[in-house]
Amino acid sequence: MTTTPPDSLPSSASSAPSAVNLHPRIGHGYDLHRLEPDLPLVVGGVKIDHDRGCAAHSDGDVVYHAVTDAILGALGQDDIGQLFPDNDPKWKDADSHIFFEEAVRRMGNAGYALGNLDITVILERPKLSPHKAAIRQNLDDLLGCDSSQVNIKAKTHERVDALGKTLRSPATSWCY
Ligand SMILES: [Zn+2]
C-alpha cells in the first residue's frame, strides 16, 4: 500500500532501484545463543527470571535479533552482524532494541511498512507462554503496528536439547 520513494536511503541500500518498492518483499531471520548459568535472559525485550541466560556480546535477545535480520533481509540490506559487529565494544551488553529500531528506521526510509511478522522461539525451558503477551506488545510498540500483524509461537526442542542449553528463533517478515 505505502510505496512512497525513499527520502534518504542509507548508503548500503542506495543500489536498490526504487521500482523494487512496488513489490512486497519477504525476509527471513534466524538467531541462536547458548544458554549459560547466571546470565540475564532477555526474550523479545522481556527479562525472564531463569537460572540461565544467553551468552552474547549484546543482551542476546534472540527474538529482536531474528526480527532485525528478517526486516533487513526483506530490504536486501546488510545483516545485523554487519551493521553491529560483535567485536565492536560499542555494542557490548547493548540493549537489542537499538538494532531492532535501526531495522525499522531503514524499512521506513526504503518506503516499506510491515505486512506481517511470524516468529518461532525454540527453547526447552523456561516456558515462554506467560511472557508471550508482553513480548508481542513490545514488538507491536517497536514496529508501530497492529497486534494482528505479529504472531509469536513457542516450541520446545522435543528433548533433543534436554538440558536447555540453547535458545533459537527463526522469524519471517513480509513488507509492502
Ligand atoms: Zn543474537
Image (cartoon, helix red, strand yellow):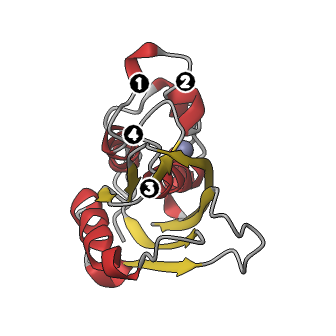
Quick check: marks 3 and 2 in contact, CB under 8 Å? Answer: no
Q: Earlier in the sequence, mark 1 or mark 2?
A: 2
Of the image marks 1 and 3, the number of the one nearer the N terminus = 3
Mark seen at residue 51: 3
Q: Which mark is residue 32?
A: none
Q: Which of marks 3 and 2 is in front?
A: 3
Q: Report the residue at 52% width, 36% height from top.
A: 56
Element type where label 2 sits in the image: loop
Where residue 129 sits: x, y (%)? Answer: 39, 82
What whole-number distance in Å separates the C-alpha atoms at marks 1 and 3? 24 Å
User: Which quarter of the frame holds ligand 1?
Assistant: top right
121, above or below 142, in the image: below
CA–CA distance between discs 4 and 2? 11 Å
Q: Give the residue type that dot 3 points to.
A: Asp
- Is residue 24 shown to the viewer in this render? no
**Disc 4 to disc 2: CB gap under 8 Å:** no
Q: Mark 1 points at which residue?
A: 91
Task: Identify the residue at the far top of this view.
Answer: 89
- Which of the image's four quarters has the C terminus? bottom left
**Residue 137 appears left or right of 28:** left
Q: Residue 22: give x, y in percent of width and height.
A: 50, 62
The answer to whether mark 1 and mark 2 are in CB contact below 8 A is yes
Q: Does the residue labelled 1 lie within 8 Å of ligand 1?
A: no
Instruction: Identify the amino acid type marked 1.
Output: Trp
